[in-house]
Image (tube, grey):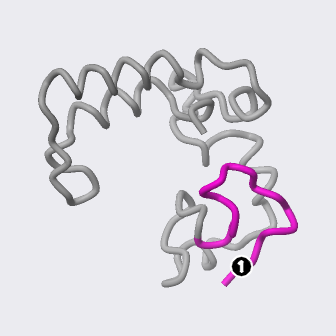
Amino acid sequence: MPEINFHHFRDTTTATLEDHYGEDASLDDESTAEIRDWLMANAAETADTRAANVFRLNPARGINSLTDTSFWRARHRGLSDAIFKSKAVRARSNCVACHEDAESGWFNPFQVEIP
């Protein structure tokens, strides 16, 4: 879902491809520039979708990740810290641990299974 991919993260991701989540995903300069330009042009800041608006980052206000947004916090407020620290989940940012449809970007509330 490009509309929840933010400029900062896209620029950082393409600048550090030699260590992309522990893998070397290096590309030639031209390919890297082409991918970075597409990601930047289609970043959340350019979209006016529900997802882009509810997950809007604002570093000046301390909203630096999706899990810092009031929308995310409201949707997950009943869950204990122990769930996010569990071996099965590991982190608040590991959406696929509980959301069966996370990779599709739908996040249907009926597709949630907390391990």
**Residue situated in front as seen by the camera: 106 or 28:** 28
Tell me residue 86's x, y (percent).
54, 82
What span is in magenta?
A: 97-115
**Residue situated in front as seen by the camera: 66 or 39:** 39
Query: Which quarter of the figure has residue 27?
Result: top left
Relative to 54, residue 7 above or below? above
- The secondary element bearing badge 1 is classed as loop
Tell me residue 70's x, y (percent).
74, 40
Q: Residue at x 75, y 51 (%)?
A: 106
Horizontally, is 74 left or right of 83 in the view?
right
Relative to 68, residue 113 above or below? below
Query: Which quarter of the figure has residue 23?
Result: bottom left
Tell me residue 48's x, y (percent).
73, 18
Density class for disc 1 (Cα within 10 Å; few <14, some 14-19, many ≥20) is few
Relative to 102, residue 55 above or below? above
Horizontally, is 51 left or right of 39 in the view?
right
Horizontally, is 85 left or right of 53 in the view?
left
Q: Is residue 110 magenta?
A: yes
Q: Is residue 85 magenta?
A: no
Q: Main secondary structure of the magenta part?
A: loop
Quadrant of the frame with the C terminus = bottom right
Q: Residue at x 71, y 79 (%)?
A: 114
Instruction: Please name the residue that numbered disc 1 is placed on.
Output: 114
Quadrant of the frame with the N terminus = top right
Q: Amino acid at mark 1?
A: Ile
Q: Residue at x 33, y 27 (%)?
A: 35
Tell me residue 38's x, y (percent).
42, 21
